Image (cartoon, grey):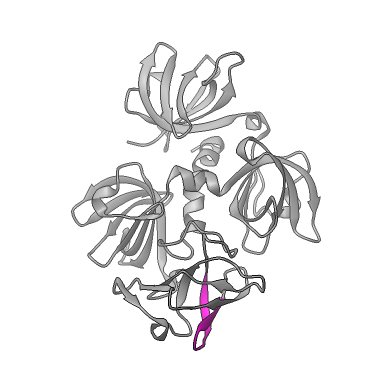
Amino acid sequence: MKLITKLVLMISLLSLGTLGAASLAYAQTPTRATPGGVRGEVTAVGDSSLTISTPDNQTITVNVSAETRIRLTETRSEGNLADIAVGNFVGVRGPKNDDGSIAARLILVLPENPRNLDRVRGRVTAVDSDGLRLDTPNGEVKVLTSETTHIRIGQQPGNLSDINVDDPVLALGNKQGEGELVAQYLLVVTGQQVRQHTLRGEVIDIDPSAGTLSVQGGGQKEGVWTVQTNENTKYRIPGVDNPSLADIKVGNQVLVIGHKADGENTGIAWHIAVIPEQYKDSMVLGGEVTAVNGDSFTLNSLRGEFTVQTNADTQYRTRGDKEVSLADVTVGSKVLVAGKMVDGQPETILAKVVGLQKK
């Protein structure tokens, strides 16, 4: 697939791997201490508290009271502090105290650290009685489920019947040979989660010694953002092998996937992609085609309904080597569009690239 289509898919597909690093029960939550939650490995258990080490190496004290709900995900039952041991991987929700500790309202205890599980991510091509099939960058993978598989649709618990073809999914479990995985956890990432963890803007300053970028965001994330990188940050830069922070320049348009940190307009980057120059002023829409009219079509997207206009310069992409065109865009097609808003025509975009998702 061409680079622009990969960048479009990055929002949903790359975020799956990072969002799923903790658990599907709270994978969408940031590491900072907020009502949204923190996650980490238990390093100590006391009479009324526990200590956790987070993925970004913070040490946090979690205070447990009679009002704290403790949920054991392996048995799907309620538990108590005595059920938590050093080495458990947990998710915690509750407010942050002045001393940096958390007053836990909910603690989710996982049977094992998801970092030790195999994972596959991709889009659903079929839902079967015993699981589903995913179209992944490495080919099709069969994901087997059982009564013990934990399924989340965004932030809500779900069932296999709630998953649809074309949903972006992360599966964590144990591989059973080539092309098959027995899932312990399944996460369907929603558009709201994607937007929550995505920042797009122009790099206006770089501090290599601190490992930070200053990014001028737009839209709902208007303002200057401080983006912190670390040894786990992944980069995608056109034409650069093994890219790093040193390959990013002031003036680059970037797409950042990560989570907010303590402090206003501050975040930690999981992935940073430099947007090619020819697409830096483009907006990206994904959704289902509801009508086709000549050289335009109507797209029902997460941002609402848009009219997508095409012209002789519009390019069409799909996975593999198959050549596609406007004729392949039909009612019901799932597409990803990159283009510019048309002046004076609200909710109308002129497409530079139309990516057809594989049926």
Q: Residue 348: horizontal and vertical position, in percent?
A: 52, 19
Q: Identify which residue, 87 or 336, lies in the foreground.
A: 87
Q: Residue 19: horizontal and vertical position, in percent?
A: 49, 57
Q: Which residue: 53% across, 61% down? A: 35
Drawn side of residue 1 relative to residue 129, left or right: right
Q: Which residue: 67% across, 52% down? A: 243
Residue that lies at the very extreme toward the left in this rendered image: 129
Residue that lies at the very extreme toward the bottom in this rendered image: 47
206 to 59, vertically: above or below: above
78 to 172, vertically: above or below: below
Q: Which residues are magenta?
A: 39-52
Residue 102, quarter of picture: bottom right
226 to 191, vertically: above or below: below
Most common SS among magenta residues? strand
Q: Does the magenta portion include 232?
A: no
Residue that lies at the very extreme toward the front in this rendered image: 66
Q: Residue 231: horizontal and vertical position, in percent?
A: 66, 64
Q: Which residue: 30% across, 42% down? A: 165
Q: Identify which residue, 302 or 335, lies in the foreground.
A: 302
Query: Would residue 155 be visible to someone looking at this image?
Result: yes
Classify the position of the C terminus by image quarter. Answer: top left
Q: Residue 220: horizontal and vertical position, in percent?
A: 61, 38
Q: How many numbered circles does the render carry?
A: 0
Residue 117, quarter of picture: bottom left
Q: Identify which residue, 15 or 326, lies in the foreground.
A: 15
Q: Identify which residue, 340 or 245, lies in the foreground.
A: 340
Query: Would residue 238 be visible to someone looking at this image?
Result: no
Q: Which residue: 22% across, 65% down? A: 147
